[in-house]
């Protein structure tokens, strides 16, 4: 099992640790994830952050094993294997791509760009 994201030992300055390929998905986490975020928010954001390296690096692929537990907790709140065929992951991947395209198109072009 490969661990990709964990928040144990986190602080307000470093609300997460990402293990594995970090250069593509980490900026998303850095910009959005807050230290006191609900774990469900973190899971959704984690899946968004995993989409970029999955699309851009041949060495990053599915499946991903996800487990969420609270600090000092003895039981996993969420435990799931996420595959390419997972409907929720597919929805996030497609939705994220659409949202990026819309955001890019919304940025106005300047006169000096020709």
Image (cartoon, rainbow, N blue to C red):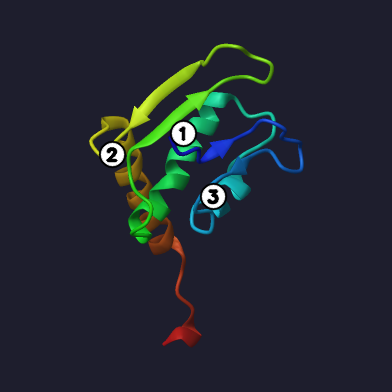
Q: What is the quadrant of the C terminus in the image?
A: bottom left
Marks counted in the figure total 3
Q: Position of residue 74 (x, y in %)?
A: 60, 12
Near mark 1 (Cα within 10 A), the count class, few <14, some 14-19 or many ≥20, is few
Q: Quadrant of the N terminus?
A: top left
Expressed as whole percent of the image width and height from the top left, the position of residue 106 reads: 42, 60
- SS for dot 2: helix
> Quadrant of residue 13 in the image?
top right
Residue at (53, 30) in percent of width and height = 41
Q: Secondary structure at mark 1?
A: helix
Q: Residue at x 55, y 45 (%)?
A: 19
Label 2 neighbourhood size at 10 Å, few (<14), some (14-19), many (20+)? some
Q: Which mark is residue 26?
A: none
Q: Residue at x 47, y 83 (%)?
A: 111
Q: Which residue in the structure is indicated by mark 1?
A: 44
Q: In the drawing, does residue 95 fall left or right of residue 28?
A: left
Residue farthest to the top? Answer: 74
Which residue corresponds to mark 2? 90
Say which element carries label 3.
helix
Asked if 18 appears above or below 59 in the picture, the reply is above
> Which is nearer the N-term, disc 3 or disc 2?
3
111 or 30, which lies in front? 30
Separation (CA) of disc 3 from disc 2: 18 Å
Q: Is residue 72 left or right of residue 112?
A: right
Q: Residue at x 62, y 49 (%)?
A: 30
Q: Which mark is residue 28?
A: 3
Q: CA distance from mark 1 to mark 3?
A: 12 Å
């Amino acid at each position: 099992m490969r661990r990709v994201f964990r928040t144990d030992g986190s602080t307000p300055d470093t609300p997460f640790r990402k293990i594995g390929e970090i250069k593509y998905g980490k900026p998303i986490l850095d910009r959005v994830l807050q230290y006191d975020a609900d774990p469900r928010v973190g899971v959704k954001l984690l899946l968004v952050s995993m989409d970029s390296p999955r699309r851009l690096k041949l060495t990053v692929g599915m499946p991903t094993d996800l487990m969420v537990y609270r600090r000092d907790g003895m039981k996993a709140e969420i435990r799931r294997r996420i595959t390419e065929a997972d409907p929720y992951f597919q929805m996030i991947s497609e939705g994220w791509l659409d949202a990026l395209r819309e955001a890019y198109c919304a940025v106005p072009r300047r006169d000096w760009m020709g």
